[in-house]
């Protein structure tokens, strides 16, 4: 290169340097080029060609660059110029290492370059790894080399047989614990310890290096001037302790892209999935797995979550933040103790923050956009309506966890969103039924994307399709018409009369269809057709365990009317005797508990009172809406069809408390305003949700299995109770009124209730549906 050409090139390069670092003079820029050894010959030409093609190479931090750019950037960064960004590894992003290997991703460090080397299976453990040694079997990995007993020798100091870490002149070896470590006097604290860094003021120990030895620069995320925890890379700038969460990659266990690290097997695991050692918690003083190391010491997961969710005023700065240090009398926040600042970088609210530095409320719109966006990355139509409704939730952290769970249904709704599939009940019914699909449908109804429907009955058609999928064709021809035109037709007609069908109606319909399928399967095993079924064959099938109680009369009657089977006789199913009764003393005790025990859930107390006073079943009480409650100046009534029952004053007080809880408006105006709303307020709670106390109470009890030869005990019928064989529709009606002395019931209320329920006020109390109600599991 001629002298004139070299002067023009240097002038062009110094101009690029000064545009990136305006505070640098031309002479200082040339001095930096000479210090980086890029001012002549091949490095100069390579630097000039790269800067012509990439004018922002000094500030972009891109790894695809020649070595001359890397050296020049290091020199400029060492002079304290903040306008340049260090060249990081094209894979791991580290900036403090030499980048000597060129790959398609750019220049990478040596550890990342070794990942491209062939990893044959270890001859001993079989794990794919780099060859670290050779044995009689072949190449072995580094872990097997360290664990090879042939290479272990006794330590000359402690005598422990282990891997040698230092050899002595006399041929002896020292283990890792006994090997000499060079100690220095720390220039800050004066403690004699190994040096973590050598500075102009002297060596620094690891503790003082973490506090005072690190360079302070503005953080690229929060903007505060703090000690740099992670230097700038191709993905981010300098990060402080509060903003650095560790390397981010796809977790090998949960599959989510989160901050974490690699285990001994080389697998990347996020911080949530990595195994944690057990230590004594600094707050609860219990030995538990460590979730975080705070200035006060190790903290378990329970105390970690409680502290994050309960911020308070700091005793030093006075700001309202998460108190991660100090003492109980003088609590301190994270920044005042040199630890992480648990503050949202978007809204500034203290509390739990995610890997992006945002709280759950600020992160939720981003997560919803990722889950519900189409192939072009946009939210449109029904999916935008769903995202807006979910973003207004009062529990954003729970919704983020739901989106993160692999079995939450997020992948299903995301697949529909990517394909821009219109959301209808028919589209969801075409998918295999599951609890995940039912929950997604409730979400769509909650967000007013889908209209409400009779959910329990409409679930039967997809369920029937799955039941008939792997069955012979003649089963489909014999069961599908019966299910659709007889069972479901009757159920829907009854639902229109009752203004909705409950879960019991749907379960009864499934039971009838399953009984028909079971009979056809038994006939196939015996090589018979439905037209060949005789009365002895039917009796033989009914005598089998569990078949006697199956409702077969409806299917056989339907088949005989269509000349598909003979006219056969199905004996009536055996009904159990009446349930156990309670006397008036126990009834009064349970009634007082329902009225006065504030520890019981309010829906359980109300349903218990309605059951004890009026004999209203649990399923019928759960079907009440807020429009079934009428109030005038002096009285409160509950409307049950054609009946209107006046409630006692203390019962009316509980009803008004429940009305205040159930009157919250929903996103879907077409949904019923249930008195006992369930999840998302789309449907009422089911009777199965009314017995959690029974599960808790029996969880730790040891049950003695009943002998199959011992008959099941049944209580005897009572003269004041209904007969055991009385039809269910008579047992489910309103019972007779209770004595007037209970809970201050006026005599006028007792007589009006008796007339409206169609019973004689002077009659004695019957058991009604008391023993069958699930709400009684809450009572002693």
Image (spheres, rainbow, N blue to C red):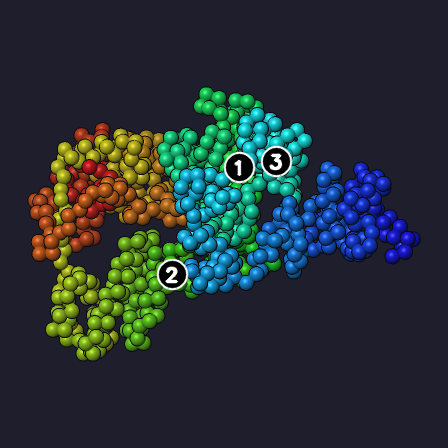
Task: Specify which label sits upstream in the sequence, 2 or 1.
Answer: 1
Apparent side of residue 256 relative to residue 590 in the rendered image (left or right): right
Label 1: which secondary element:
loop
Label 3: which secondary element:
strand
**Residue 622: image tag:** none
Whether residue 201 appears in this view of the structure is yes
| Discs 2/3, front | 3
**Coordinates of residue 444 in the picture (x, y in percent):** 46, 53
Label 2: which secondary element:
loop
Task: Specify which label sits upstream in the sequence, 2 or 3.
Answer: 3
Apparent side of residue 593 relative to residue 237 in the rendered image (left or right): left
| Discs 1/3, front | 1
Dot 1 corresponds to which residue? Answer: 181
Q: Could you give the CA–CA distance between mark 2 and mark 3, rounded to whole angstroms?
A: 62 Å
Apparent side of residue 744 relative to residue 197 in the rendered image (left or right): left
| Discs 2/1, front | 1
**Residue 433: image tag:** 2
Q: Residue at x 35, y 37 (%)?
A: 658
Dot 3 corresponds to which residue? Answer: 197
Task: Specify which label sits upstream in the sequence, 1 or 3.
Answer: 1
Whether residue 775 appears in this view of the structure is no
């Amino acid at each position: 290169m001629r002298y004139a050409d070299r002067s023009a090139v240097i002038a062009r390069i110094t101009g690029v340097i000064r545009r990136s670092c305006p505070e640098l003079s031309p002479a200082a820029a040339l001095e930096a080029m000479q210090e980086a050894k890029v001012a002549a010959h091949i490095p100069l030409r390579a630097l000039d060609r790269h800067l012509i093609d990439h004018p922002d190479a000094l500030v972009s931090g891109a790894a695809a660059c020649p070595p001359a750019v890397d050296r020049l950037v290091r020199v400029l960064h060492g002079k304290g110029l903040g306008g340049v960004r260090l060249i990081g590894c094209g894979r791991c992003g580290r900036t403090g290492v030499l980048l000597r290997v060129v790959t398609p991703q750019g220049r990478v460090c040596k550890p990342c370059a070794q990942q491209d080397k062939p990893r044959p299976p270890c001859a001993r453990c079989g794990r794919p790894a780099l060859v670290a040694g050779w044995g009689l079997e072949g190449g072995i990995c580094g872990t097997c080399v360290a664990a090879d007993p042939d290479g272990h020798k006794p330590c000359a100091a402690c005598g422990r047989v282990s891997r040698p870490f230092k050899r002595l002149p006399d041929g002896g070896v020292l283990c890792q614990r006994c090997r000499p470590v060079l100690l220095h006097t720390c220039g800050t604290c004066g403690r004699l310890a190994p040096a973590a860094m050598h500075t102009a003021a002297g060596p620094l120990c690891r503790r003082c290096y973490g506090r005072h030895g690190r360079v302070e620069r503005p953080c690229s995320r929060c903007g505060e001037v703090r000690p740099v925890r992670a230097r700038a890379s191709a993905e981010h700038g300098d990060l402080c302790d509060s903003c650095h969460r560790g390397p981010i990659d796809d977790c090998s266990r949960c599959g989510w892209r989160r901050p974490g690290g690699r285990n001994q097997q080389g697998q990347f695991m996020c911080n949530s999935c990595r195994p944690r050692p057990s230590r004594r918690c600094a707050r609860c003083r219990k030995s538990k797995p460590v979730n975080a190391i705070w200035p006060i010491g190790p903290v378990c997961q329970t105390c970690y979550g409680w502290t994050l969710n309960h911020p308070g005023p700091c005793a030093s700065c006075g700001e309202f933040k998460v108190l991660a240090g100090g003492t109980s009398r003088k609590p301190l926040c994270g920044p005042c103790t040199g630890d992480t600042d648990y503050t949202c970088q978007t809204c500034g609210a203290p509390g739990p923050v995610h890997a992006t530095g945002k709280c759950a409320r600020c992160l939720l719109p981003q997560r919803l956009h990722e889950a519900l966006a189409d192939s072009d990355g946009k939210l449109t139509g029904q999916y935008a309506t769903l995202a807006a409704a979910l973003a207004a939730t009062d529990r954003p952290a729970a919704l983020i966890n739901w989106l993160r769970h692999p079995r939450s249904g997020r992948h299903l709704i995301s697949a529909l969103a990517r394909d821009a599939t219109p959301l209808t009940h028919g589209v969801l019914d075409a998918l295999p039924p599951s609890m995940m699909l039912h929950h997604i449908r409730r979400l769509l109804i909650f967000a007013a994307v889908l209209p409400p429907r009779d959910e329990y009955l409409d679930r039967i058609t997809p369920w029937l399709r799955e039941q008939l999928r792997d069955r012979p064709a003649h089963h489909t021809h014999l069961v599908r018409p019966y299910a659709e035109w007889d069972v479901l037709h009757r159920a829907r007609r009854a639902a229109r009369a009752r203004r909705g069908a409950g879960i019991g109606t749907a379960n009864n319909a499934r039971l009838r269809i399953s009984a028909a399928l079971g009979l056809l399967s038994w006939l196939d095993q015996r090589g018979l057709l439905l037209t060949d079924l005789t009365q002895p064959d039917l009796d033989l099938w009914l005598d089998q365990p569990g078949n006697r109680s199956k409702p077969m009369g409806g299917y056989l009657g339907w088949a005989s009317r269509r000349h598909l089977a003979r006219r056969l006789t199905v004996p009536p199913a055996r009904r159990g005797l009446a349930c156990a009764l309670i006397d008036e003393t126990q009834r009064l005790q349970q009634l007082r508990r329902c009225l006065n025990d504030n520890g019981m859930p309010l829906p359980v107390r109300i349903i218990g009172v309605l059951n004890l006073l009026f004999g209203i079943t649990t399923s019928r009480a759960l079907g009440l809406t807020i429009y079934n409650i009428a109030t005038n100046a002096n009285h409160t009534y509950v409307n049950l069809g054609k009946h209107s029952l006046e409630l006692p004053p203390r019962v009316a007080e509980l009803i008004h408390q429940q009305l205040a809880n159930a009157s919250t408006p929903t996103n879907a105006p077409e949904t019923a305003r249930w008195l006992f709303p369930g999840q998302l307020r789309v449907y009422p709670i089911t009777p199965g949700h009314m017995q959690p106390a029974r599960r808790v109470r029996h969880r730790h009890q040891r049950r003695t299995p009943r002998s199959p030869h011992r008959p099941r005990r049944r209580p005897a019928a009572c003269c004041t109770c209904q007969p055991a064989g009385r039809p269910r529709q008579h047992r489910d009606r309103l019972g007779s009124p209770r004595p007037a002395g209970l809970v201050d019931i006026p005599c006028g209320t007792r007589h009006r209730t008796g007339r409206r329920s169609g019973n004689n006020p002077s009659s004695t109390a019957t058991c009604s549906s008391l023993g069958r109600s699930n709400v009684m599991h809450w009572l002693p």
